[in-house]
Image (cartoon, helix red, strand yellow):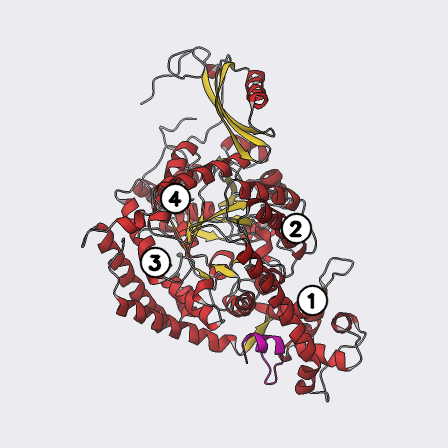
Amino acid sequence: MASVPMDVRKVARCREIAAEIADDVQRYIDSHTTVGVERTILRAYGAEGVDDAGVPLANTAVDRYREAGLLGRGISFFLGRALLAGAANIQDAAERLAYAPDIDRGDGEPGHHAAREALRPHTEAALGRIDRARQERDALRLRVPAADTPHKYVIVATGNIYDDALQAKAAAQAGADIVAVIRATAQSLLDYVPHGATTEGYGGTFATQENFRIIRRALDEAVAEQGRYIQQTNYSSGLCMAEIAWMAAVERLDMLLNDAMYGILFRDINMCRTFIDQYVSRRFIARAGIVINTGEDNYLTTADAVEKAHTVLASQFINEAFALRAGLREEQMGLGHAYEIDPWLPDSFLLEIAQAQLIRQIFDRHPIKWMPPTKHKTGDIFFAHVHDAMFDLVGIATKQSIELLGMFSEAIQNPLLMDRYLALKATRYVHGACRHLGDEIEFKKDGIVARRAVQVLDEAASLLEEVRRESIWEAIGRGAFADVKRTRTGGKGYAGVLERAPEYTNPLLTALEGR
Amino acid sequence: MHPTTPNKPLRAYGDREGDGMVQLSFALQLPPGARAREAAKRFAEMHGLGDPIVATMEACAEGFSFFVVYGHSPHAVDAANIDVPEVRTAALGREDIEHRIKARLGRKIVVVGGCTGSDAHTVGIDAILNYKGYAGDKGLESYKGFEVYNLGAQVENEQLAARARALRADAILVSQVITQRNCHKENGRALVELLEREGWRRDTILLFGGPRVDHQLALELGFDAGFGPGTKPSDVASFLVERICGPLATSPA
């Protein structure tokens, strides 16, 4: 069976260091909240709707308390007090927070214990809603199991959710196991979740609850038709990553792009904001049984894939450590990496296989996500098809769990219906023809593949040491990941970060934390 | 080296001169079958392809067929009478670029860039501006003669213009990757109009870049030059040096 040398003590050491790095940040997270977190809580309790200008109720309520300097006590505190003051239900209570003539300054009684108590049945209902969605998914997956891994993951991206639904079903018919609906590029920087169905999106559709439902319905039909479970994916990232995670949890999505550092590096979202939001989003994700996909593959689109391969591995250790602190099981951690080495570099294939095999071995319980070449796609679709086939070969030989299929039209356009079909056909061939290749081959001791694997782990360990010494805040500041530099108070969304008051109230988060 | 363009109309070259051979692939909303095959053949004929051969017909989704068709195109294109604006700059070496900036300008060339509008894809602007560069060609940041401000993703035109004006930028680089419903053209044109309204369009050099951008499009939108896929940082550096520090004696007019 294929394997590369892996020093288990070194791997254990990497995990220890990553734990220290994450603990440092976790102390910060545990004493702060964000507008995104508080909005998520309101939504999870059942506050819904938008005003005439399209502003979600959750935003109006949370912004009002933030502007009044009260949000550090937690929106739940005021929600509980509104219930105790006679609000008929959560919706009524949330509307009072948003629109009542006078803001509740939280003075006097009832205190946080009473507020928490008033929310108790609603906290249970909020958890119950997530749990029911999870049970429904589990039951369906038991009845209609998924195909063998690597699961074939494709993207639809028409900008119209109804066309997306059509294309998603077509992709399932053509053999896809996972369908992602690409999200409008601008959404990551919106500090609210748009409402309703998207029919004219730029660069994709918005992640909205209604869009989630439309695609889930289409894929449920596809599951029934194909007799094979088809997973739905969207993006829990950007300034609303926690709200989107909750929406996905109750709308029965199977996977979410969700990364502890992606927003910081690639969308210039403030790092304090991102660390807090990723934690709370992952608390919901953990409860919902959703699989996350982390974004380390993106590092190699900006940094060199040979020189910076170890940054991917180091970041995976860090993402894993953060995920563990948010209650995720390893089986929910789809750590990402990619086939992005210059294809014309001699032995590039060997370097790719070394990295893929190493990551497979280190993260042996994790549904590792294998991403296709994009950076070196030129528009020569014939060459690109060969390039993707080599990527498929590494995917099956090293037993990757989730494989996002390469598209030969990558550098040209959103994939056409036939592009996706041809990608699925080629992958079906390579995966079938090499089904047990990984069990049959061994890598030469001290050969190119083995030596490369050792080198990458060594370099990752050194980088983790450095990051621990200087702290992750500083490390990101000097461009340790993806060659991108960010500062602690820079980036978007920092104004939405608040220190928790001593009696911060958030019973739903407390319940998700199992406390 | 390619041979000189023949001075006659050209047909597509397949296996021998003049055969006009092309391949076409497409999907039709028809299940595979005799009717679908005939439909594909006629579809190809309507494009002018003679003796079309439907090489592949497969179901690519329920109710859809995927086709690969070969046929002879009767069309001939007269390349001799085509005049396309091209960014014509002799590629300068690093030393030459640095030297000319120092000797002729005596200060750094200030460059401000970003992806405008909702575009979050910084891969292009990063490749040109950031130290790392692209395909082994280091970015403008790596030159002593350039002072670079990469504003990154999703920069509003107003923000970009304000920053560029405050920095007295010699050049503004706009990258646009997303092209849905031609939003790249709208964003680009809007920036040009903004600078014109503010009355300083002629005080700076405006460059437009992206996978669906060419020099002609950039000129149409009111930019000074356009750079498409495969552009290296040194191409942009050479262009700017030539514009700002004066042309080489040997450069074409």
Mark 4 belongs to chain: A
Q: Dot 3 lies on which element?
A: helix
Pointers 4 and 3 in contact (C-beta within 8 Å): no
Chain letter of disc 2?
A: A
Q: Amino acid at mark 1?
A: Ala
Using a 10 Å C-alpha cutoff, classify the residue at mark 3 as few (fewer than 14 neighbours), some (14 to 19) or many (20 or more).
many
Specify few, some or many for label 2: CA neighbours under 10 Å numbering under 14, 14-19, or 20 or more. some
Q: Where the C terminus of chain B falls, by quadrant?
A: top left
Instruction: Judge whether A472 appears above or below B34 on screen.
Output: below
Residue farthest toward the front in the current orientation of the protein = A143
* Residue denoted by label 1: A58
**Chain under disc 3:** A
Tell me the magenta residue range: A498-515
Residue at mark 2: A214
First in sequence: mark 3 vs mark 2: 2
Mark 4 or 3, nearer chain start: 3
A506 in magenta: yes
Residue A139 visible from this viewpoint: yes
Marks 3 and 1, how far apart at CA: 40 Å
Per the rendering, the mark at residue A359 is 3
